Structure formats: C-alpha cells, structure tokens
Image (cartoon, rainbow, N blue to C red):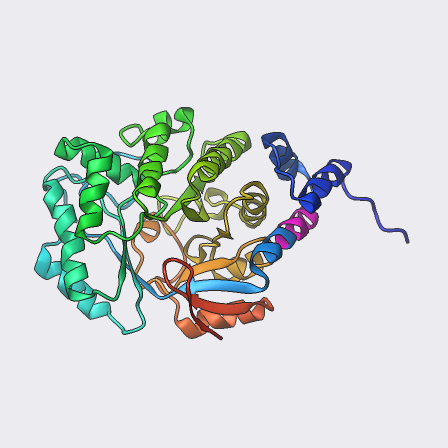
C-alpha cells in the first residue's frame, strides 16, 4: 500500500520548516485546519529538537497570590474578589512568611507571584512583598506581576510603567511572568478583560522590562471567544517584539478553564486543540527557545504527549496553584520532582531541572 500523500498545503509548510523560513499567519491557519495532526506534530517536534535536542526542562517553584482583591472583572476569572466580599484577602508580612514557611522545601528556586489588581493597598505593598521574600529567601528568584499588573501599578502610583519596573527591580524583581496577555487583540480584550491593560500596553510593559535587562515570559489564554486567526495574530505580535528585544524566554499556551470543577467536557478545550496549539506555537514562534506545556491546565498525560508536539518545558512542581484551580482546573495542585521526571522519561526525553533562566541545575 503506498503511503498517502500529506495534505498538499502541508507540503509547502514542510519545505519552509526544513529551510528555517518563517511561517505566515496564513500558514498557521492551514496548520489549524488540516486533519493531519500527526504531521503538524512531527514538524513541531523537528523544530524543537533542533533547538533543544531531547532535553525537557522543569523547575521547583512555589506560587504565591498575595491578594485576590481586584478592580478588574475579567469574565474568565474565578479567583478575584471585590473589597469586603466574602473570601477576599490581602496578606500582610506575617501572613506571607507563614504561607511560604508552611510550604517550603530547600529545592524551591522560584516564587511565582500573581495577584489581584487591588486598589485598597498602595504600590509600596507590592514592592514590600518582593523585599520581604528577597530578605528571607535570597536564594530564590522572584517572578512577579504580569504586564497587566505593571500597567495597573502605573495607574495606582502615578508613575510611568518604566518607573514602576525600575522600582520593582530595585526591590529585587528578577523576571515578569507571562500572564495578563490573554489574547492580544482589542476585539477580544473589549469583551473578556475590558478593565485590563490593552494589547499595546501589555507589549509595552514587556518591551520596557527587556530594555531594563529583564528576561520575561509570555502566555496565551485560548479556548473561548477568540478566532484561530486571533491566536495567530497574538503569536505574531509576540514574535515581532521578540525580533526587536530577544527578551522572552518561553511561550506558554494556557487552555481556558471553565468556571467550575464540575463543568462537563463541552466546557473544556479538546485534547486535539491543546496539542495542536502547542505544535503550532512551536512552528510560529521561531525566535522563542521554549514552548511550555502547562500541566496544570491540560493534565499530566496530555503534557507528556505534548513533548512530542514541540514542547520543551513542563513547568514545575508548583506548590499550590490557585488561579486555574479557582476557575475549574481538574488537576492536582502540585506534582513531585519524581513524578515530573517520570513523565519526561516516559516520553523518551531527558529531564533537566532548571532555574528561572534555563540554567541547568541537574540532569536526571
């Protein structure tokens, strides 16, 4: 039996991938439309192995959400509370240190801090959060505050975004997480996160951070009202900024979580869409070193599959993640280092424990 020819549209894309030529948004749409998912995976795997060989990275990290009080009302968020609402909290220094101490182990390398846009506290509160952690845990990098939070801090403090970033860096900030990007088109933001930073403001926050010497992260929250084209426009905007600054370390596609844990399958992204989006991210974002499969959102088993679909990072041990879980994620709130290593080895890849900046700590 002769082998069935590839989808002909993929043949031209395959040529481009082989020669290292950049794919267009039209190419991306063809990759989203083709029924030949395994060829898309193969191409993404080829690009990933060119960049990273068989290495797959993970980190031991702890999530901290210092406050869930938020002025914004993004439709996809189950985490936020309004001031005074039941369940609203804002950690003080004592709460913060107690929270960390109860979850601490000596392998943790990174604090990942994201919170609400809380107007009840001054900008100093956010600076102090970093100072406190740096003072007590100087060995940990602080990955704190999304591009949307940077824009919010500028409004809160009357400073420019650049001044905000400089003060955060002076307090000990090491990198920005990738959140707050959602989908970088104004049609999407007007509907889904109207009070949050615009597309240009989010990109500007990261561009300024890169200019000030920070390496940062970028996400995409997919699976709601956005079109496939908007996902690709989002990737293209990140790619253009990366051409300019080379400041992004990794791209993290995040599957939209439904409002409740009991939500049925129809309210969740499909496994096909998750794997395809990871593969397309790898093919479109030719100037990013890493594409992360975020096991919190897609589960450990799909994460393992994603390692053949172009992903070179599976995030981390993640001691207690709250934001996806408050919006209906079904996964456990943490995995052990042994479990992460098992996942990676099961995909015939090499597990590499890293620090925030992809420096190797240990190979397993």
The reply, left or right, for residue 170 in relation to residue 257 is: left
Magenta-colored stretch includes residue 160: no
Residue 178, position in %: x, y?
37, 45
The span shown in magenta is 36-45
Residue 4, position in %: x, y?
83, 47
Q: Which residue ends up furthest to the right in the rendered image?
A: 1
Name the main secondary structure of what is drawn in magenta: helix
Residue at 26% from the left image edge and 46% from the top image edge: 145
The reply, left or right, for residue 59 in relation to residue 31 is: left
Depth check: 127 or 219 in front?
A: 127
The reply, left or right, for residue 1 in relation to residue 189 is: right
Does residue 223 appear in the picture of this structure?
yes
Magenta-colored stretch includes residue 39: yes
Q: As displayed, is residue 253 above or below residue 234?
A: below
Residue at 54% from the left image edge and 62% from the top image edge: 304
Q: Quadrant of residue 100?
A: bottom left
Does residue 71 appear in the picture of this structure?
no
Quadrant containing the N terminus is bottom right
Residue at 60% from the left image edge and 69% from the top image edge: 348
Q: As displayed, is residue 268 above or below residue 356?
A: above
Depth check: 312 or 341 in front?
A: 312
Residue 31, position in %: x, y?
64, 39
Q: Quadrant of residue 224?
A: top left
């Amino acid at each position: 039996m002769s082998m069935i020819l590839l989808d002909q549209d993929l043949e031209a894309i395959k040529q481009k991938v082989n020669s290292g030529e950049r794919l267009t948004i039209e190419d991306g749409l063809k990759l989203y439309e083709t029924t030949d998912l395994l060829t898309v995976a193969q191409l993404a795997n080829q690009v990933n192995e060119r960049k990273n060989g068989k290495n797959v990275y993970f980190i031991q990290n702890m999530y901290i959400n210092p406050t869930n009080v938020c002025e914004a009302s993004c439709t996809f968020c189950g985490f936020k509370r309004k001031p005074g609402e039941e369940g609203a909290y804002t950690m003080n220094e004592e709460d913060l240190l107690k929270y960390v101490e109860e979850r601490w182990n000596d392998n943790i390398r990174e604090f990942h801090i994201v919170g609400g846009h809380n107007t009840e506290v001054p900008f100093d509160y956010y600076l102090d959060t970093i100072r406190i952690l740096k003072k007590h845990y100087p060995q940990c990098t602080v990955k704190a505050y999304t591009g949307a939070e940077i824009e919010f801090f500028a409004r809160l403090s009357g400073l420019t975004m650049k001044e905000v970033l400089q003060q955060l860096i002076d307090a000990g900030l090491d990198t920005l997480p990738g959140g707050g990007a959602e989908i970088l088109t104004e049609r999407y933001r007007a509907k889904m996160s109207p009070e949050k930073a615009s597309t240009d403001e989010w990109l500007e926050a990261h561009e300024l951070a890169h200019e000030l010497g920070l390496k940062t992260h970028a996400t995409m929250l997919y699976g709601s009202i956005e079109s496939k084209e908007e996902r690709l426009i989002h990737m293209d905007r990140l790619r253009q900024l990366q051409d300019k600054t080379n400041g992004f370390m990794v791209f993290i596609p995040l599957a939209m979580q439904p409002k409740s844990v009991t939500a049925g399958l129809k309210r969740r992204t499909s496994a096909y869409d998750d794997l395809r989006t990871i593969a397309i991210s790898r093919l479109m974002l030719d100037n990013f070193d890493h594409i992360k499969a975020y096991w919190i959102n897609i589960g450990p088993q799909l994460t393992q599959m994603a390692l053949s679909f172009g992903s070179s990072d599976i995030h981390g041990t993640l001691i207690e993640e709250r934001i996806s879980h408050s919006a209906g994620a079904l996964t456990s709130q943490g995995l052990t280092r042994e479990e992460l290593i098992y996942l990676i080895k099961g995909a015939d890849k090499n597990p590499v424990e890293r620090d925030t900046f992809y420096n190797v700590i240990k190979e397993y």
